[in-house]
Image: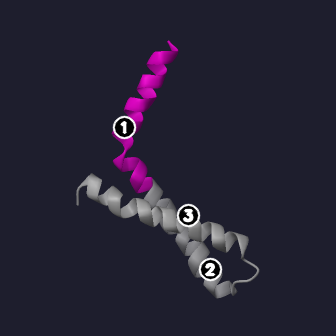
Amino acid sequence: MTAEKWLKFSVPIQGLLLLSQLATGLNYARIPWTVYQVVHFGGGVLLAVLVIVHVVINRDWLQKAYRRRQAAQK
């Protein structure tokens, strides 16, 4: 899978996981503990993995943007 296809696939999933984290975090008292563990903790781990993969895929762009900012400050 190319980087572009991977990003088109993973970014919407990251958005849904982020909303899921917000919803379960704010409503933890209303959710049964077993469901909370699976959705919040499991979703958090999956979100962290996808964010790391996202940063790795975009590291070239991040390096270019960071270098541009450093050059502008000099």
Q: Distance between the Cα atoms at labels 1 and 3?
A: 23 Å
Question: Does 41 sit left or right of 47 as displayed?
Answer: right
Q: Which residue in the structure is indicated by mark 2?
A: 37
Between discs 1 and 2, the one toward the N terminus: 2
Give the quarter of the image for residue 29: bottom right
Magenta highlight on residue 66: yes
Q: Distance between the Cα atoms at labels 1 and 2?
A: 35 Å
Q: Secondary structure at mark 3?
A: helix
Q: Please say if 14 is above or below 70.
A: below
Q: Which residues are magenta?
A: 52-74
Task: Write the residue at 52% across / 16% down.
Answer: 73
Say which amino acid is labelled 3.
Leu
Say which amino acid is labelled 2.
Gln
Instruction: Tell me how many marks there are.
Output: 3
Q: Position of residue 8 (x, y in %)?
A: 33, 59
Between discs 1 and 3, the one toward the N terminus: 3
Are the residues flagged by discs 1 and 2 in contact, CB closer than 8 Å? no
Task: Write the residue at 74% across / 83% down.
Answer: 30
Q: Please say if 22 is above or below 68.
A: below
Q: Nearer the viewer, mark 2 or mark 3?
A: 3
Q: Residues within 10 Å of mark 3 (few under 14, many from 20)?
A: some
Are the residues flagged by discs 1 and 3 in contact, CB closer than 8 Å? no
Q: Position of residue 45 (x, y in %)?
A: 52, 67
Q: Which residue in the structure is indicated by mark 1?
A: 61
* Magenta portion: prevailing SS class: helix
Q: Which residue in the structure is indicated by mark 3?
A: 18
Task: Write the residue at 38% across / 48% down.
Answer: 56
Q: Residues within 10 Å of mark 1 (few under 14, many from 20)?
A: few
Q: Please say if 60 is above or below 67.
A: below
Q: Secondary structure at mark 2?
A: helix
Q: Position of residue 36 (x, y in %)?
A: 64, 80
